[in-house]
Amino acid sequence: MHVCTGCSCLCDDIDLKIENGRISRAYNACRRGAGIFLNISSSRAKPTIDGQQVDLERALQKAQEIIQDSENLAIYGLDTTTLEAQRLAIELAEKKEAFIDDNSTFCLGDFVEMILKKEIPSTTLEEVKNNAYVLFYWGTDPYHSLSRHLSKFTYYPRGGKRQRGYEEDRFLVVIDIRKTHTAKLAKKNARFLKAENDADIIRGFIDALEGRSPKIFQKEIPRILKEMEKGGFNVIFGGLGLKYGLGGDYALLKEMIERMNERSEVYFMPAGCHPNMRGFNELLFEKTGHVNRYSFREKRSSDDFAFHRLLKNDSADTALIIGSDPLNSLPLEYAGKLSEINTIVIDPRETFTGRVAKVTIPSALSGVESGGTMIGADGSRVELNPVFEAEINDEYILKKLLEVV
Ligand code: SF4
């Protein structure tokens, strides 16, 4: 069996059929996951300098020269690569007194940080499968973003104490600003709460827990709390909608979870996409006490060290992008600056950022062409089982860059 690195579920039951040295089937994988295995040869990156194809050694040498000469290096991306490569990138950042950041600044790094600081209780997907009764999906639509979350880990599977099927043994709560595909599943034994304001819904739960009538969802909130007491083990999956709905202030969320835990076990888990975002957060946290936006020169984390802010404020003379495409995902006014500084891209595939980069270095696809370890959104470590072994992977390239610092 192989592990899919298509999202933070890190499904470890992918059964591949290989014919004439090519992967022809990816059983059990969702559409996104199957695409990774079946399309390994499409849009592969090539070694380039200033957009011109060169041999790999020349590209590596040029990248070494740039890193050596850089005075303000920013390292970014990293959520699609392995822990082993992330560790090397952090070592490089430390030696160069560089900035380091990943997608979790935009994504769910705040939630991971609260879990690592033990400010909110969390659990594993295995525990959820075996025990969880009320499942909240709050500001997230896993039907699209984490396609097998519901079927493999949470709502549909039977396991442990949950043997009677989702119709009886799970209670689904979807909270979102619109009726998403996940919300459409909320029929029997389920509730959909349309979120005009996430903080108001949290206040509604706190009011009900304190014996007052909630100002909104007066019938739904007490019913959900009653189901939670009945189930005994419940979990809230929080997504980007919840993060941005709360505007960075999580005091109420923490209070609600604490109060809920006085009546039943309630856990919180980020529902984010990047396969090894949590891995990067954990490694940086172990090293610095922060999960992202870190400056090794100033030895602190700050919004000013978020990658887009570094670009906006012209704080970096060199960007080393690993497994990410900021030109495709960040606002152009910031990402456009990548063409003005020395940008090095390490990626298995061609990217928009690669087109404006000084140097591009093609790498192996983690999980398909190189092994290593990743940490899923629930904190579980997963060993990758590659189909092929490419010599030039992120680890190899980062070790080469480390040789010159
Ligand atoms: S749910 Fe995620 S990890 Fe699982 S097969 Fe789909 S893309 Fe891959």
Image (cartoon, rainbow, N blue to C red):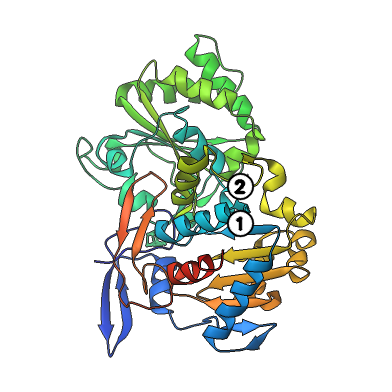
Task: Identify the residue under disc 2.
Answer: 296
- Pick whichever of labels 1 and 2 is earlier in the sequence: 1
Q: Is residue 184 left or right of residue 309?
A: left
Compared with 276, 216 (above or below) is: above
Q: Residues within 10 Å of mark 2 (few under 14, many from 20)?
A: some
- The front one of 286 and 380 is 286
Task: Look at label 1 and name its amino acid.
Answer: Lys
Image quarter of the C terminus: bottom right
- The front one of 77 and 275 is 77
Q: What is the number of the mark on residue 96?
A: 1
Ligand 1 located in image quadrant:
bottom left
Dot 2: element: loop
What is the distance, in whole Å, between disc 1 and disc 2 at their CAs?
8 Å
Task: Look at label 2 and name its amino acid.
Answer: Phe
Q: Residue at x 38, y 38 (%)?
A: 188
| Residue 176 in sight | no
Give the quarter of the image for residue 85: bottom left
Q: Residue at x 56, y 55 (%)?
A: 95
Give the quarter of the image for residue 317: bottom right
